[in-house]
Amino acid sequence: MKGNRRLKMLFERKKENERILSLFLTAGYPDPGWSAELIVGLAEHGADLIEIGMPFSDPLADGPTIQYSSQVALEQGITMEKTLQIVQDVRAQTDIPLILMGYTNPLISYGVERFCEDAVKAGADGLIISDLPPEESGLLRSSTRMAGLSMIFLVAPNTPDERMRRIDEISDGFIYCVSVTGVTGARDGDEIADSVDRFIERVNRNITRNPTLIGFGIRSRDDAIRISKNVDGFIVGSSLIDLIRESYPNSGWDKKVYSFVKQLKIGNIK
Amino acid sequence: MTKDSRREYQKYNMPDEKGYFGTYGGKFVPELLMPALSELESAYRVANRDPRFTSEFNYYLNEFVGRPTRLTFAERLTNHYRRAQIWLKREDLCHTGAHKINNAVGQVLLAQRMNKKRIIAETGAGQHGVAVATACARFGLECIVYMGSEDMERQKLNVERMKLLGAKVRPVESGSRTLKDATNEAIRDWVTHVESTFYVIGSVVGPHPYPMMVRNFQTVIGQETKRQLEEKNLGTPDILVASVGGGSNAIGFFYPFIEERQVRMIGVEASGLGLQSGKTAATLTLGRPGVLHGTRSYLLQDGEGQVKLAHSVSAGLDYPGVGPEHAWLYDQKRAEYVSVTDEEALKAVELLSRKEGIIPALESAHALAWLETLMPQTVENQIVVLNLSGRGDKDMRTIAEHLDRESRGADRI
């Protein structure tokens, strides 16, 4: 199936009361040998979409949790090639949409065109680059388009209305809504609840072409229910990694992770 | 040299409106910072055209920083090499001991204008941190400085200075616990407190408009040099030499001379333990283009695009990137970039101290060390101007350890 097809179908099939559950996991964490199996497991236990983090030495948009998982993965020898191999291994077992998420430098070092081709060949559907705003995305867009890779941009509480509309126009797949100003990481629920309603109201007014997923700071099902009321779904990353960090490699660590995932899913439980 | 590119220098007007110097520069930042960068850009543009802002900036440069700094004839150093005349632009005489304060005052004045009450900064050796803490104390603003815990250990004195000035020094424990990681952490803080906070970047790095803005605040170095040379009837200099880490002292010094093609400009990087050692900070010499901290420029990186750790005895040059304008000047061959080792820089500290009674900062000593190579190529009636970017008080521990090692070595012989 062609890359962005899988994403389109995911949102088309979504039921009214359902929320898309997107999970973020750093490639190669907790162990490069585990990654593919773990991701397949996440898909089997309720995830609708997986974002696979491509580790970078200087993840300046990430909080302590993802900094840590990136560093562990790099120390264990994760490379772009191995990350793409993980994508390929996952793709052999499931049809879940896979988004690669990372930073500009490893991508241009690999070669933008080659990267997009290899990513699609491996079975990836889309791309999120944390330090590549629309203004700089020209260096990627012809390659992503040619390869058929969705380009996903972010909007944040401080993104002006008109800019949101422009981002909606150049994105395909979905829009990543950042719930709070800050870096990635789990937060106190109240910290995000206060201002998020006004933000989502603006998102829905300005973003009309693409589905919307909200992320940053979601720790629990309650957080997710509260925050994803008026969007298509939500993204959980740091909390998942924190849980792995706490329990890996004790016996039953994966079961713990999967039961966390299971209870995050809202509506239309598989 | 084609006619066209010559014309380009005659009206040197970089960066373009997107913040690019050729293919270098730009704004590679998280979406959250884009509104902040636009706000900063327009505030700076207005301030830059406002004569009141310029005169306020100049007032503090004169009355607070102690400008203009002298252009000193290095008589005994000149006699030592017996070639071109050597002149020193004395940024070491600035308040707080280095050129960093020029930029800190400029940006803090801009922050005040933008009504931002919370100032953050990153620092490696602590010179930029001290400069920002100083400016914040002077204008009564809250100041938070991110510093790698490794650097805090190495530069205890500057940590104490910042604290005394009322700044909060936040230790950074992530990654290599040095300048690169302190910068990551400052950017994370900015992302989190983007509405209230002004991020004072210490060099000509980071996303647009920083490389342009910091350069402009440092251009006073080159402008004064030019005027002082005229006053002394020395005319146009033949060669300018400056050290390059991020490159703010060098670009401020070079900038007013870029259009004068006959002026050779030489930037000296830190090759640390040597270009082949793997422990080096010679970004232009050894790196390749990449993206770090919001800008596209040369970068020390491995085959996977992961950023390498830099090494230099001089904490101020210990950075794996370099300003995008230097990358452009390097590609255009308008400026030359060379490197010297830790050892050579330490020798130069000793030479200048003995010959001129001036103890240079280790950063500036890299420029001085290149004179060993450069001076034999010069002739007597030429003028070499070297930007002495800072004084060496802060480096006394490192220097003393080196002298100690050397004298023990001598004893053995």
Image (spheres, coloured by chain):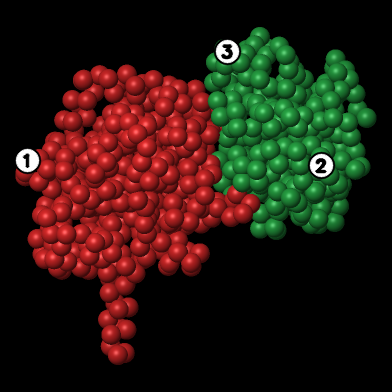
Chain colours: A green, B red
Q: Nearer the viewer, residue B72 or A251?
A: B72
Measured from the top left, where is residue B174 in percent x and y?
54, 51
Label 3 amino acid? Asp
Q: Which structural element holds mark 1? A: helix
**Which of labels 3 and 2 is toward the front?**
2
Kindly identify the residue that appears in the image at 28 percent across and 57 percent down: B367
> Which chain hosts label 2?
A
**Residue at the outermost left position:** B232
Q: Are marks 3 and 2 on the same chain?
A: yes
Measured from the top left, where is residue A110 in percent x and y?
66, 46
Identify residue for label 2.
Answer: A122
Q: Count every numbered label the image shows and give the total.
A: 3
Measured from the top left, where is residue A217 in percent x and y?
66, 32
**Which of labels 1 and 2 is toward the front?**
1
Crowding at dot 2, Cα within 10 Å, few <14 / some 14-19 / many 20+, comes out as: some
Label 2 amino acid? Ala
Kindly identify the residue that appears in the image at 27 percent across and 69 percent down: B347
> Which chain hosts label 3?
A
> Could you tell me which quadrant the C terminus of chain B lies in?
bottom left
> Which dot marks residue B173?
none
Q: Which structural element holds mark 3? A: helix
Kindly identify the residue that appears in the image at 56 percent across and 46 percent down: A58
Q: Calculate the distance from the C-alpha at mark 3 to the C-alpha at mark 2.
A: 36 Å
Label 1 amino acid? Glu
Identify residue for label 3.
Answer: A161
Identify residue for label 1.
Answer: B231
Image height of A243 relative to A116, above or below: below
> Which chain hosts label 1?
B
Image height of A10 relative to B162, above or below: above
Q: Calculate the distance from the C-alpha at mark 1 to the C-alpha at mark 2.
A: 68 Å
Q: Nearer the viewer, residue B364 or B296?
A: B296
